[in-house]
Image (cartoon, grey):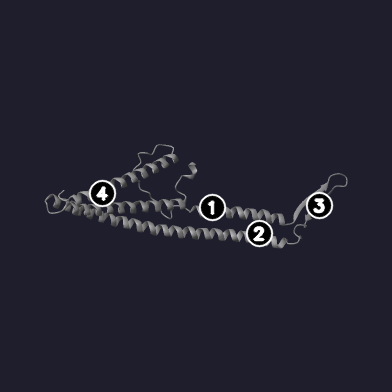
Amino acid sequence: MSDSSDLHILRQKMLEINASKSAATETARTAISELNAMSIGDLSDVRGTSEFPVNASLAQPLSVTQSEAEKIRAIAAAKVDRAGQLPGLSASGTVGEDSTFGLNLNTDTLLGLGTGDRLKAIEATKEAAGRRVAQANEDANRQLRKLEGQIASKERQAAEAAGLTAQAKQNLDLFQAQYDAGQRQVMDVVGVYEIYARQQETEVTLKYEAIRLRVAMAELLGVLADGSAI
């Protein structure tokens, strides 16, 4: 180094790089510990991520499934309530010389005050349950369409970033060769290296943002775990 100020700047940058690396390593170590706490096996050697195929048509969203189940339950409860409001029919009789048989119709509940209103309320319960299912389906579809758009955007940006990273690496190699030939100053190479490092970080960030969005879609669809195996 011919300039002591350049040496000072380089040392400062090295300290910043080491500090960032230590922080990232600690974050990764904490994440692996949390993952191991949720797993039945040791996942400390897990690196990166495999292909995560998921799309909006893979399964019915959990919120819609729940609403449909609640609809079935509400309609069943409404039918039970409605049966309690209708007249009852019972048979009675005696066996012997003076045997008698008859059917009795209990109309007390049917003729009670407010019975008609209660029957209307039961029918309204069915309609309301159907509307909740429709609303849940609409909300889920809207969220899925939003996630689809975000995933496509992030993956496109990640692909573009990969191209820019490759270009930045070529520039770095060129500047390094020119520096070795005495045509560049060391700070010129440092500047290009920083651009390359930032571009790498951007590429990785976009890649995993897309994966997180796919995980969010899988959660919405309820396919993060095999429910039948739980």
Q: Nearer the viewer, mark 3 or mark 4?
A: 4
What amino acid is at disc 3? Gly
Q: Which residue is mark 1?
A: 66
Q: Which residue is mark 4?
A: 12
Task: Calculate the distance from the C-alpha at mark 1 to the C-alpha at mark 3.
Answer: 47 Å
What amino acid is at disc 1? Gln
Position of 57 relative to 49 (above/below): below
Instruction: Name the mark on residue 102.
Output: 3
Q: Nearer the viewer, mark 4 or mark 1?
A: 4
Q: Position of residue 119 (x, y in %)?
A: 68, 60
Residue found at x 56% / y 52%: 69
Position of 123 relative to 58 (above/below): below
Which residue occupies the extreme right position in the image?
A: 97
Q: Is label 2 in a helix, a strand or a loop? A: helix
Residue 39's image quarter? top left
What amino acid is at disc 2? Ile
Q: Which residue is mark 2?
A: 122
What amino acid is at disc 4? Gln
Q: Is tag 3's residue or tag 4's residue first in the polypeptide sequence?
A: 4
Task: Calculate the distance from the C-alpha at mark 3 to the C-alpha at mark 2.
Answer: 32 Å
Task: Calculate the distance from the C-alpha at mark 2 to the C-alpha at mark 4.
Answer: 74 Å
